[in-house]
Image: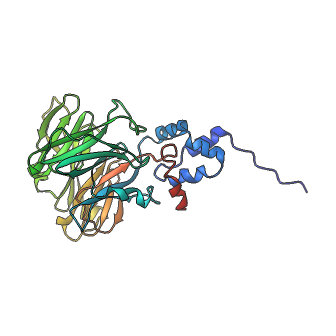
């Protein structure tokens, strides 16, 4: 009897075309594929493949979000990461040395942490994927209240692979409490927007001109329960806010030749049109928005949820949480930048 014929090996080019289509929102797929054989491991770890992989999928996936967990024993915080994928991409001990620090912003794969020591603000910019950390110099002035944003400093960058590159931090503040909103900032072109909750105002900082201005929000914003600033597809500023049991979306006219007012372009009745349950409408809060993905984060007295604005698809994140704000973390998690951490994903399977 003739021995069975062996299957011909796939050409290296075909293997690469197959592996490049592995879903970026499941980093464990890359780990398992890299364990098949040494040639696959070399291919998946090569910077050239990882650059192609990011360019092929374009938008960095949502891996989870961070929030500030209040420690019952003191007034300190401790950042917590809640994964939106399984298994969790980070080991549990990744945040063990962050006690006392709190999250201020999260963008372009970087997390901005802060802590106040002897009335002085200390900032650290951290990449959780590579575990690279940069401690920043003390701010030149002491502010009674502040907010901050971390941004990629490379003009024209597509932010697919800017980790390890230059960045800067924008800090706004004042001597009074009302600047101290922990609502996430939003970046639109060269403008960074901050919500000043207690004054019902939006602060705009232009990076190119190095100037500040203020924007009055829609009237309904002032009686709403929780807001999120968000970029619109036309490059204008948007707001997601809760009014009663309705999720209301506004956009600001971006045409300089037209009156720059607010337009309410969509209203979503949470009670009837989406499976976001709640017992009391005053407990509905918008707590975050994932830039570039169109995903909004909502909490109620029943649980925490994400909702894709285009499809209204809802995903429950878990039980009720006391979150005032969450910081979505979007990043590619590839072997070239996370070789020391990715094995934990393989152990989970």
Q: What residue is at 23 percent from the left and 57 percent from the top?
A: 286
Q: What residue is at 49 percent from the left and 46 percent from the top?
A: 334
Q: What residue is at 37 percent from the left and 32 percent from the top?
A: 157
Image quadrant containing the N terminus: bottom right
Residue 338 lies, in percent from the top left, at 48, 47
Rendered position, 84 above or below 184: below
Q: What residue is at 62 percent from the left and 45 percent from the top?
A: 40
How was the colour assigned to the protein in this rendering?
Answer: rainbow
Image quadrant containing the C terminus: bottom right
Residue 147 lies, in percent from the top left, at 19, 46
Q: Is residue 44 left or right of residue 217?
A: right
Q: Is residue 151 left or right of residue 14?
A: left
Q: Is residue 196 left or right of residue 79?
A: left
Q: Is residue 237 left or right of residue 259?
A: right
Residue 253 visible in the displayed image:
no
| Residue located farthest toward the bottom when viewing the structure as drawn | 279
- Total numbered circles: 0
Rendered position, 225 above or below 131: below
Give whichever of 77, 90 is nearer the camera: 77
Residue 89 visible in the displayed image:
yes
Residue 30 lies, in percent from the top left, at 54, 50
Q: Quadrant of residue 15?
A: top right
| Residue located farthest toward the front when viewing the structure as drawn | 118
Q: Quadrant of residue 216?
A: top left
Give whichever of 245, 7 is nearer the camera: 7
Give whichever of 136, 223 is nearer the camera: 136
């Amino acid at each position: 009897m003739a021995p069975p014929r062996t299957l011909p090996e796939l050409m290296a080019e075909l293997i690469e075309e197959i592996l490049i289509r592995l879903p970026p929102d499941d980093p464990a797929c890359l780990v398992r594929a890299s364990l098949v054989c040494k040639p696959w491991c070399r291919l998946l770890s090569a910077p050239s493949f990882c650059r192609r992989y990011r360019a092929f999928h374009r938008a960095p996936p949502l891996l989870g979000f961070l929030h500030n967990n209040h420690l019952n024993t003191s007034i300190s915080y401790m950042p917590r990461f809640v994964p939106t994928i399984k298994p969790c991409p980070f080991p549990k001990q990744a945040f063990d040395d962050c006690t006392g620090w709190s999250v201020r912003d999260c963008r372009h794969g970087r997390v901005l942490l802060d802590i106040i020591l002897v009335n002085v603000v200390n900032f650290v910019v951290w990449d959780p994927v590579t575990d690279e950390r940069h401690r920043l110099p003390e701010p030149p002035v002491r502010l009674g209240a502040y907010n901050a944003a971390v941004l990629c400093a490379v003009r024209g960058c597509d932010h697919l692979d800017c980790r390890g590159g230059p960045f800067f931090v924008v800090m706004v503040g004042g001597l009074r409490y009302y600047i101290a909103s922990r609502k996430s900032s939003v970046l639109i072109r060269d403008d960074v927007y901050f919500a000043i909750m207690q004054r019902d105002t939006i602060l705009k900082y232009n990076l190119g001109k190095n100037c500040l201005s203020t924007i009055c929000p829609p009237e309904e914003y002032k009686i709403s329960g929780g807001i999120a600033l968000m970029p619109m597809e036309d490059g204008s500023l948007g707001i997601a806010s809760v009014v009663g049991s309705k999720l209301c979306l506004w956009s600001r006219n971006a045409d300089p030749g037209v009156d720059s007012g607010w337009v309410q372009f969509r209203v979503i009745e949470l009670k009837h049109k989406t499976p976001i349950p709640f017992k009391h409408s005053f407990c509905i809060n918008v707590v975050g928005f994932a830039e570039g993905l169109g995903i909004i984060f909502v909490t109620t007295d029943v649980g925490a949820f994400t909702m894709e604005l285009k499809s209204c698809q809802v995903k429950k994140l878990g039980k009720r949480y006391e979150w005032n704000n969450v910081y979505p973390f979007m990043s590619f998690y590839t072997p070239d930048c996370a070789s020391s951490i990715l094995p934990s994903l393989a152990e989970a399977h």
